[in-house]
């Protein structure tokens, strides 16, 4: 029993030493990334590596028992393990030989570094370049309707845009705006937004839904608010605001050439964030 315990401890220490060597290689690759591109997950990965290295160092410093000579045992090779070994070997640099302990250490680290799919919130923040104030027209972007005349009868919030819209309101100061023909149209829009639950998310209030009687009125709203992003379907307004707004998103079913370097185009708001 003592020999078995000692053998297991020696194997563990040997594997951890191999793991420490492989971690050092991973650390060198990780720190080659520009610090400006580090996000919260990258920082977490670095912290995890630091803990692993400290743990490895402490075990390596612990006194190991005298090594006993053990007869080499030939492990049977199954077809699946052979395929796995061959695939790992194919990824190794030519002229370098790795033992089974090296491959085990590599598999442990590779599993730790499995890519994590970003959340919708992370995608929204990245796409908006951390912009904090956004103005957005309603017709054709948030609402199904595409003309002020249609708003006189009803207003319908597009269900496909809700998730993205609510995510934007979590960290952005969002203002919605539209040209309307009468007070009844305003009531229809506000009721549709309220029924969709947009006001209950905490990021948008009715005072930030603005109405005007002309297209130029919407342009004036945007100029006064000075947002980081403006989202619109009218190409003329997008062109007029290109000199004054940092970024714009032109919603259009037809892909158009970029009118300016700071103007992006997408068939829908949700499609811009990869949800369409």
Image (cartoon, rainbow, N blue to C red):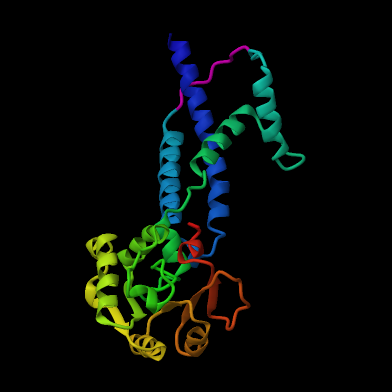
Question: Is 66 part of what is drawn in magenta?
Answer: yes
Q: Which residue is painted at 54% across and 47% down in the image?
A: 24
Q: Is residue 116 above or below residue 68?
A: below
Quarter assignment of residue 215: bottom left
Q: Considering the whole magenta stretch, tell me its main secondary structure.
A: loop
Q: Position of residue 146 (x, y in %)?
A: 44, 73
Position of residue 262 in the picture relative to residue 138 (left or right): right
Q: Which residues are magenta?
A: 64-71
Question: Is 69 part of what is drawn in magenta?
Answer: yes
Q: Position of residue 235 (x, y in %)?
A: 52, 82
Q: Is residue 156 visible?
A: yes
Most distant residue in the front direction: 153
Most distant residue in the right direction: 95
Position of residue 86 in the picture relative to residue 51 (left or right): right
Q: Which residue is painted at 49% across and 66% down in the image?
A: 268
In-front residue for pair 63/190: 190
Q: Position of residue 39 (x, y in %)?
A: 44, 60
Q: Is residue 132 visible?
A: no
Most distant residue in the top direction: 1
Q: Position of residue 262 (x, y in %)?
A: 53, 80
Q: Is residue 27 above or below residue 192?
A: above
In-front residue for pair 119/85: 119
Total of numbered circles in the picture?
Answer: 0
Looking at the figure, which quarter contains the N terminus?
A: top left
């Amino acid at each position: 029993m003592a020999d078995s315990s000692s053998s297991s401890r020696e194997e563990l220490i040997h594997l951890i030493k191999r793991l420490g060597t492989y971690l050092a290689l991973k650390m060198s690759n990780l720190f080659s990334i520009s610090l400006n591109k580090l996000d919260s997950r990258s920082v977490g990965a670095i912290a995890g590596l630091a803990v692993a290295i400290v743990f490895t160092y402490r075990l390596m410093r612990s006194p190991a028992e005298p090594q006993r000579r053990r007869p080499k045992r030939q492990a049977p090779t199954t077809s699946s393990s052979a395929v796995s070994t061959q695939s790992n070997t194919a990824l190794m640099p030519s002229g370098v030989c790795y033992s089974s302990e090296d491959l085990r250490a590599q598999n442990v680290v590779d599993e730790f570094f499995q890519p994590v799919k970003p959340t919708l919130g992370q995608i929204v923040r990245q796409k908006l370049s951390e912009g904090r104030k956004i103005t957005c027209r309603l017709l054709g972007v948030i609402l199904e309707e595409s003309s002020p005349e249609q708003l006189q009868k009803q207003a319908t919030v597009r269900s496909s845009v809700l998730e993205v819209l609510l995510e934007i309101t979590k960290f952005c100061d969002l203002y919605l705006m539209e040209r309307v023909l009468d007070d009844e149209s305003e009531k229809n829009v506000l009721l549709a937004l309220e029924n969709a639950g947009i006001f209950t998310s905490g990021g948008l209030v009715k005072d930030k839904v603005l109405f005007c009687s002309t297209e130029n009125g919407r342009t004036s709203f945007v100029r006064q608010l000075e947002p980081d992003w403006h989202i619109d379907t009218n190409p003329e307004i997008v062109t007029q605001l290109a000199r004054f707004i940092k970024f714009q998103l032109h919603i259009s079913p037809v892909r158009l050439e970029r009118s300016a370097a700071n103007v992006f185009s997408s068939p829908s708001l949700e499609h811009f964030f990869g949800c369409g």
